[in-house]
Amino acid sequence: SCGKMESASLEVRIVDPERLIDLGSDRVGEIWLAGPSVGAGYWDNPKATRSTFDGRLEGSELKYLRTGDLGFLHHGNIHICGRIKEVIIVRGRNVFPSDVCAVVESEVEAMRGRRAAAFGVVGAEGEEIVIICAAKVSQDTYHAVAKRITAALSAQVGVVPSTILFVQNRDLKRTTSGKVQHSALKKDYLAGLIEADFEVHN
């Protein structure tokens, strides 16, 4: 949980981003915000302002900020799942990179204290999952670690990654605050710019 939504001046809604309806509690949707602390828009960019700061629920004239974040409310607490643009759709099911990485980082010994990135790429049968790991792996154990990653994800998330890449810790792009840049790494992967120490395909 990121805490309770107790501000009287800030209205928080969890919204179906396609149907533009309030989903209420315990359902994942886009987080929308309205209140005096929300900005009015982007400077000199009316198109971006309309798409981001002019979210409206069906039958309401109140303007909301569309955060682009996915989350849900549970007992008044807000939980963040990830970014809409980073969601991986595997056989019609939404898979969050944060869930994939949490399993990899906690369940695989070689990843303890290390970070991973996950994203979707178009494959022969729809979106496939690619994982980039900054793991403590020796040359002769890459395949064994990849098998452990695959088994953990199959058991806990119900997905099997198509590709697992192992890179040096310094090569896993992060923001200045330390967050892994999933989208930037996906862009580099598609452009062939990832220098992997080893690559495993399932």
Image (cartoon, rainbow, N blue to C red):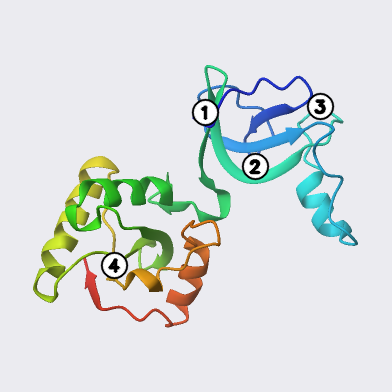
Q: CA distance from mark 2 to mark 3?
A: 15 Å
Specify few, some or many for label 2: CA neighbours under 10 Å numbering under 14, 14-19, or 20 or more. few
Mark 3: amino acid:
Gly
Q: Position of residue 179 (x, y in %)?
A: 49, 56
SS for callout 4: strand
> Does the image show residue 159?
no
Name above or below for residue 121 compared with residue 75: below
Residue 101 point in image, percent of width and height: 35, 51
Q: CA distance from mark 2 to mark 1?
A: 14 Å
- Farthest top residue? 75
Which disc number belongs to residue 1?
none
Disc 4 versus disc 3: nearer the observer: 4
Q: On the rendered structure, is 6 left or right of 49?
A: left
What residue is shown with label 1? Answer: 27
Q: Quadrant of residue 168?
A: bottom left
The residue that disc 4 covers is 163
**Residue assigned mark 2:** 18
The type of residue carrying mark 1 is: Arg
* Of the two numbered discs 3 and 1 in the rendering, the one whose residue sits closer to the viewer: 1
Q: Residue at x 48, y 64 (%)?
A: 174
- Mark 4 vs mark 2: which is more N-terminal? 2
Q: Amino acid at mark 2?
A: Glu
Marks 2 and 1, the one that precedes in the sequence: 2
CA separation in Å, label 4 and label 2: 31 Å
The amino acid type, in three-letter code, at marker 4 is Thr
